[in-house]
Image (cartoon, rainbow, N blue to C red):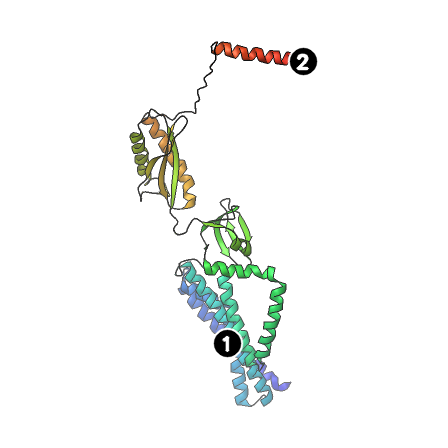
Amino acid sequence: MQHLLWPALGFAVALIAVLALRWAVMTVFNRWATGPGALAAFLQAIRLPSLLWCGVMAFYVTIEAASEADVLPRRLTGELTTILQASIILSVTITLAGMVETLITRVGESRAFGVPVTGLARAASRLTILAVGFLVLLSALGIHIAPILTALGVGGLAVALALQDTLSNPFAGMHLLADRPIRVGDYVKIADSVEGYVVDVGWRSTRVRMLQDSVVVVPNKRVAESIITNYDLPQSRLALGIRVSVDYDSDPDRVEAVLVDEATRAAPDVPGLLDDPRPIARLIPGFGESSLDFTLVCQVASFVDQYPVQHELRKRILRRLRAERIGMPFPTRTVELRGAGGGSGHARALADRGEHGERDQHEAG
């Protein structure tokens, strides 16, 4: 064991020196990375793998120094070299997995893919690199991977048949990523019961944040099988219809002009209300029981903007109609009673008939 003392001390000294160098380099780069830019993301990705690099470099220096000084036996040197190769493969694999995940996240945040990247995509990329690195590591250690792959294939088939209900959610998540009926950030309605913003599409479930600021977790299988209404496809802009009822004495052309003018004036002041295309007013649904029913159609920026836009527009329209002296009627209904002896006699006959009927029922009882 004495022949291992000097190599162990050399490894400790080399490790301390490399860690000090890492600290100096990271300190300099952290001063440059003042904001949440690409450099800061890169430093965050290599923070843990850089510790592995330090250990590998110290281990390499120790083996080279011991080989030149002929301190260690050749057999032990060969085993340490194999361990060094495995350490290099492991550190490179972990580094690549972290960097690729960070890169995909950054590209997704910048919308270079057109849509944000989901957690399933990040996890799939990381697991793919780790699986490839693990196979390379086994090959470097002299382990034949062909029998392992064959056994995993047969065992995977058995596991897939036994856990088909559980595995349906990951495959449904992959289907959602490939078909893209929903995207992170879209406002959707799933199965007429869940409505809100898509937060993430994971391995097992899809998370939807509702307007009440609560998150609903829906299994991917349920999402893939449900009817989905995506209010952000093909675009976020939405046509909003507001029903306005006025008196039958009102001039339809004047009412139409007033509604369009008020909606056009409100566009610069009401957040979410768009002035292009221009608002329109139509006599639809048309002739009501006691009113002329107009529909004012305008464009809003997104689905959730319709609620504050309706609130502001209704107040403005009400004030404008009052200023223009255009009435908004209450529902009314005219009832006409006809009879041979006049309305009052007919009503009295009905009352007498009701009294006779009650008296006959009392005597029968």
In the displayed structure, 331 sits above or below 260; it is: above
Three-letter amino acid code at disc 2?
His
Q: Residue at image x 50%, y 9%? A: 345
The percent position of residue 223, horizontal first and vertical second, equals 52, 53
- What's the distance in space between the residues labelled 2 and 1, CA to CA? 112 Å
Whether residue 216 is visible, yes or no, is yes
Q: Which mark is residue 108?
A: none
Question: What residue is pinned by disc 2?
Answer: 362
Depth check, front residue: 142 or 106: 142
Circle 1 packing at 10 Å, graded few (<14), some (14-19), many (20+), is: some
Q: Residue at image x 41%, y 43%? A: 305
Three-letter amino acid code at disc 1?
Ala
Q: Is residue 28 left or right of residue 321?
A: right
Q: Which mark is residue 17?
A: 1
Image quadrant assignment for residue 244: top left
The percent position of residue 150, horizontal first and vertical second, equals 59, 76
Q: Residue at image x 41%, y 39%? A: 308
The percent position of residue 206, horizontal first and vertical second, equals 52, 55
Circle 1 SS class: helix
Depth check, front residue: 23 or 80: 80
Circle 2 SS class: helix
The percent position of residue 143, horizontal first and vertical second, equals 58, 81
Q: Check the picture and name the quadrant holding the C terminus.
A: top right
In the displayed structure, 171 sits above or below 297; it is: below
Q: Earlier in the sequence, mark 2 or mark 1?
A: 1
Q: Check the picture and name the quadrant holding the N terminus.
A: bottom right
Q: Is residue 149 left or right of residue 117?
A: right
In the displayed structure, 292 sits above or below 268; it is: above
Image quadrant assignment for residue 117: bottom left
Circle 2 packing at 10 Å, graded few (<14), some (14-19), many (20+), is: few
